[in-house]
Each structure stands twice: as structure tokens, then as C-alpha cells.
Image: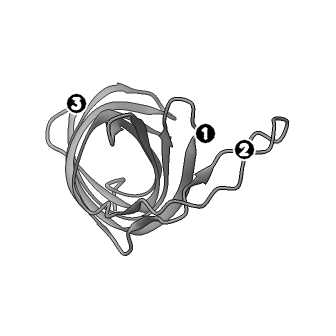
């Protein structure tokens, strides 16, 4: 549609860390892969507004570490839909590449929660074998909700 409607594939990642239960360091990492459609509309010469609808697939990792204890970790999968609206300030435009700074606000709906029901110790194969351990149930996390992003885009 006159170079306004595009197929888009992308990756968004982030990590959050905090202290839990007094002495445990918790780390949550999210890698979201998305595929969808984006509709662009040029408002002024360097300013473009857009809307996006995409399917998302998440790989979510949780790890817990305490002094003198092995690290417990697990990865979970989640998926759903995402809709967003934003603005892009085009900072560079070449024949084969466009670079822009973006700000966007949207909502992501996940079809399932990321469940962490089997956290187990990370074992180094070259080190000594740990004593018998049991997996820990740490609950689940719903990644649905409002999302905002500040960043940069590259269009090929």
C-alpha cells in the first residue's frame, strides 16, 4: 500500500534483577520474537506515526542464586498477540536502509502464563556431582499488559 504497510519481524529482549526472600538474587530475562504487520503514515518530513499488530513468541528465563548454593534456573515459553501505536523520528535515510528513533505504547495479550514449576540446579559437567536435590515450584508469570518502548529501528 504505497510503502505504508509492511511485514515486520523483530526481537525485543530485557532483563530484570531483584533480591527475593532476603538473600536470594532473582533474575528474569525475556526474549520476545514477533512477526506481524505495521502501517506507517508520514505526518511531517522526519516524523512517522505507525500502528502494529503482531504475533509474539516469548522465551522467559528465571534464575535464583544464594551465597554458597548452586544457581537454580528454568526456561518457560509463552505466546500471544501484541498491538501498539508509536512515533518514529527518521534520523537517516539511504536507498537500502532507514534508521529511526522510536517511542511506542501498546498492549500485549499472552495466551498462556510462563510457568516456573521445575527450577533445578545448574550443574557443571566437569565439576563434582551435587547431592540429590528436588525441583522447586516458583509459580507462574503472566506477561500480558501495557508495554512501552524507547529505542531505535532499522528498516531494510
Q: Judge from the rendering whether residue 19 lies leftward or rightward of residue 8; answer left or right.
A: left
Q: Please tell me whether residue 67 is drawn above or below residue 104 in the rendered image.
A: above
Outermost residue, left side: 43
Question: In the rendering, which numbered label is found on residue 70?
Answer: 1
What is the spatial separation of the Cα atoms under label 2 and label 1, in whole angstroms? 8 Å
Whether residues under marks 2 and 1 lie with C-beta atoms below 8 angstroms apart, the answer is yes
> Residue at (14%, 42%) from the top-left corner?
43
What is the spatial separation of the Cα atoms under label 2 and label 3, in whole angstroms? 52 Å
Pointer 1 or 3: first along the chain: 3
Q: Judge from the rendering whether residue 36 lies leftward or rightward of residue 71; answer left or right.
A: left
Provide the residue designation for mark 3.
Answer: 46
> Residue at (51%, 61%) from the top-left corner?
76
Provide the residue designation for mark 2.
Answer: 123
What is the spatial separation of the Cα atoms under label 1 and label 3, in whole angstroms? 52 Å
Outermost residue, bottom side: 111
Rendering coords of residue 151 (x, y %): 32, 33
Pointer 2 or 1: first along the chain: 1
Amino acid at each position: 500500500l504505497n510503502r505504508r504497510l509492511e511485514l515486520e519481524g523483530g526481537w525485543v529482549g530485557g532483563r530484570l534483577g531483584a533480591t527475593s526472600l532476603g538473600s536470594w538474587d532473582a533474575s528474569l530475562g525475556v526474549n520476545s520474537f514477533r512477526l506481524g504487520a505495521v502501517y506507517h503514515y508520514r505526518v511531517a518530513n522526519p516524523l512517522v506515526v505507525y500502528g502494529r499488530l503482531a504475533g509474539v513468541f516469548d522465551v522467559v528465563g528465571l534464575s535464583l542464586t544464594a551465597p554458597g548454593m548452586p544457581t537454580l534456573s528454568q526456561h518457560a515459553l509463552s505466546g500471544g498477540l501484541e498491538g501498539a501505536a508509536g512515533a518514529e523520528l527518521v534520523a537517516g535515510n539511504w536507498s537500502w536502509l532507514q534508521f529511526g528513533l522510536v517511542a511506542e505504547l501498546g498492549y500485549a495479550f499472552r495466551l498462556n502464563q510462563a510457568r516456573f514449576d521445575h527450577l533445578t540446579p545448574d550443574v557443571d559437567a566437569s565439576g563434582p556431582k551435587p547431592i540429590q536435590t528436588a525441583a522447586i515450584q516458583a509459580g507462574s508469570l503472566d506477561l500480558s499488559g501495557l508495554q512501552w518502548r524507547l529505542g531505535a529501528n532499522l528498516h531494510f
